[in-house]
Amino acid sequence: MISTFPSPALRGALIGLCATAALPAHAQSSGKDDKGVVFSIDATTRARGEVIDGQFRPGVPADDAFVSFRTTVAAKAELGPIAVGGEIVDARGYGQRAGSSVRTSEVNALEPVQAYVAYRASDAFAKGATATVTGGRFALDIGSSRLVSRTDFPNTVQSYLGGMIDWRSKGKDRVVAFWSKPFSTLPDTVADIEDNKIQLDRAGGNLTFFGASAMAAKAFGNISAEAYGYRLAEDDRTTRLTRNRHLVTAGLRLRRAPAKGAFDFEGEGAWQWGTARATTAASDVRDLDVRAGFTHVEAGWTAPRGWTPRVSAMFDYGSGDGRDAGSYGRFDSLFGARRADFGPNGLYGPVGRSNLISPGVRLEAKPSKRLDLMAAVRGLWLAQATDSFASTSVRDRNGASGRHAGTQFEARARRWLVPERLRLEVGGAWLAKGRFLETAPNAPATGDTHYGYVDLAASF
């Protein structure tokens, strides 16, 4: 369903939809039959309204509105150490303008994102430890979620066909190893997305993703340490041209979790190498040497009482592609999430871990058990002036538009209207565009970007 951008009154009505619709968002039940089989069912529904103006992406409407609904139903049957499970996600959206930026991350109607068999062994290699072996179709979320994640803000869920071993100790150490064929989300054409067409995702034979992660919960006192390595191998197929990425990504993460009255910190960095092509064009057959990386550093302090505000400073770097014609330097974030570090996605989402230099500060507070607040500001620069900035697709190949992309302001409030049963979330962002996003050859002449959203979720 497509419409022109609504009037202010209709725009308010779209936003109000999510705050007034009485939609059940979470239902859970379990039971046990006379043969000792334990059944469990978990269901969720989320409604969201979004509006944006001053679009930063080239080639899409300057203003847009979008109302989306996501429903999930997950079921599992357990007989001793063996479990059989599955999950269906129904993500649909309405009201966007013709030519909207809404794509596969927001629409994927009636998709079985999980269908697996798992075996769980107790006291595996250590007392109190468990090892779970899973085969079939499954979702993944590893470590900080920056490279492998089950994203939540986007409506759709990335899933994988293959096998996984997940070992966890009593002390919360974790080792994960997997081999998979990632699914490509369908439909992927504009017309089918606008129609919310039901089309099953496809696990392409031309794309393989595997790797491992090991995390020690108390590697250095109360500091956790994680090391990981991932391999992505991609090739063209007759129906889909690719960049032929053959990448290895290795990284390390150290973290001291936030606690009342204490300082915390996190540092994560990854190096990426291999080969890839600059574009997906059929005429592009040149494999370039990849040398790329990303870094995230954050430090904060949490007050011991009252609203327990946490003040933090952070710095993010993602490499970009330079002028060297024989190499490729833009970091590929694989299947990672961006929301926690860089703000909301959906109709928004200009910031990502590619061609980015970004310092920032954040304030979080919990006035009550029902309410939490967050506000953040980030400066935005390009690591390479000749590459496209972050996730915007705005580029100046000559580097004449400078490196300052702008400043992003973000705020969010979440409140449990009924504790653990009904929650309302309201948020927004303002991208004050800098010289690059104003003067680059393909930058939209739309002024600053303003974005707002509202979510309603319930459980019973």
Image (tube, rainbow, N blue to C red):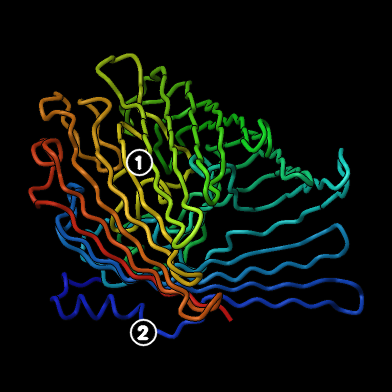
Whether 286 is drawn above or below 460: the answer is above
Name the residue carrying label 1: 352
Farthest right residue in view: 35
Q: Earlier in the sequence, mark 1 or mark 2?
A: 2
Q: Quadrant of the N terminus?
A: bottom left
Q: Is residue 149 left or right of residue 41?
A: left
Whether 419 is drawn above or below 158: the answer is below
Residue positioned 29% across, 58% down in the render: 347
**Is 380 or 34 nearer to us in this picture?**
380
Residue positioned 79% across, 47% down in the render: 170
Name the residue type under label 2. Thr
Whether 419 is drawn above or below 342: the answer is below
Residue 380 at x, y percent in the picture:
24, 38
Residue positioned 27% across, 20% down in the render: 322
Residue 423 at x, y percent in the picture:
46, 74
- Which image quadrant is residue 437 in? top left
Name the residue carrying label 2: 20
Whether 71 is drawn above or below 106: the answer is below
Q: How many marks?
A: 2
- Which image quadrant is residue 348 in? bottom left
Residue 270 at x, y percent in the picture:
49, 27
Residue positioned 16% across, 62% down in the render: 63
